[in-house]
Image (cartoon, rainbow, N blue to C red):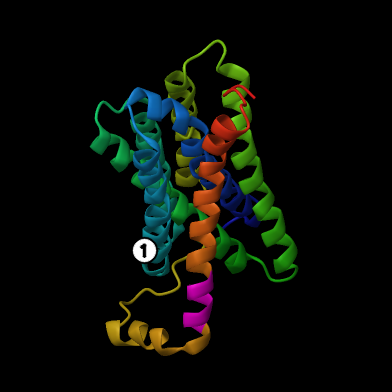
Amino acid sequence: MYNRTLVFAAACIGLLLFGIGMITLGSILPSLAEKFQLNEVAAGTLVSILPLGILAGSLIFGPIVDRYGYKGMLAINALLMVLAMQGLAYANSLWQLQASIFLVAFGGGVMNGAGSALVSDITEGGKGANLSLLGVFFGVGALGMPVLLGLLSKNFSFESIVSTVGFCLLLPALYFLLIRFPEPKQQEEVALKQGMRLIREPALLLLGFYLFFQSGAESLVTNWTTTYLLQKAGLSSQQ
């Protein structure tokens, strides 16, 4: 039997990681553009990888979680984010950087979807309140990374900061492995035809259409804001 408090904490940690992953690129984008000699178009192309990774992670987590449970999925993706953060910090070529961005976005997409689904699974009453509280941890991660970079960038390189934060993500991976999660919902394989039937549902298509553009706009705007403020408002990277 799983402990609801521990499982809810795991979901909150997952959203915290998602917040960190979503905002890290935007926070270091000016430094990456300088390091790799990227123009505005090339830098914008890097940002556009984020929605693709999040979309891929959001699509794949559901069937795997239903069949195999949350533990392995959350732990593996936390480790992927550790690897991706090292890539963001120390990539030597553009393709390595692009792969790292995709991995951190993919891991974040899984964390976001799995965290919300996990809270829904373990909550019997007050589901809306718990999901709202869950969203707070996304905000903490999203706010914490830029603040950390701003405070430490005078004394440390962005590579060192991002790498250290990445290694700290090993702790959530260990936590995911140590606690017990709810059992998988679907022990047997679901026929592909059954899954494809959902695509014909108008309400599902409309919701997916809305979330596709909303999520894309969210990830792009938050990461382009840094570049805009530096170039148009004349702010320094520390500010």
Q: Magenta stretch: residue 92 in it?
A: no
Residue 95 in sight here: yes
Instruction: Give the image location of residue 27, x and y in percent.
Output: 52, 33
Rendered residue at 44%/55% (across/down): 110
Instruction: Give the image location of residue 162, x and y in percent.
Output: 46, 27
In this view, the residue in front, 26 or 159, is 26
Query: What secondary structure predominates along the stretch shown in magenta?
Result: helix
Q: Is residue 137 left or right of residue 82?
A: right
> Which stretch did the figure color magenta?
204-210
Rendered residue at 45%/72% (across/down): 185
In which quarter of the view is residue 41 placed? top left
Q: Indicate whether 64 appears above or below 18.
A: below
Instruction: Give the image location of residue 61, x and y in percent.
Output: 40, 62
**Which residue is disc 1 drawn over?**
60
Q: Amino acid at mark 1?
A: Ile
Q: Which image quarter is the N terminus in?
A: bottom right
In this view, the residue in front, 132 or 235, is 235
Q: Check disc 1: other Cα within 10 Å, few if <14, some if 14-19, many if 20+.
A: some
Residue 180 in sight here: no
In which quarter of the view is residue 154 placed? top right
Rendered residue at 61%/67% (across/down): 120
Q: Indicate whether 238 appears above or below 207.
A: above
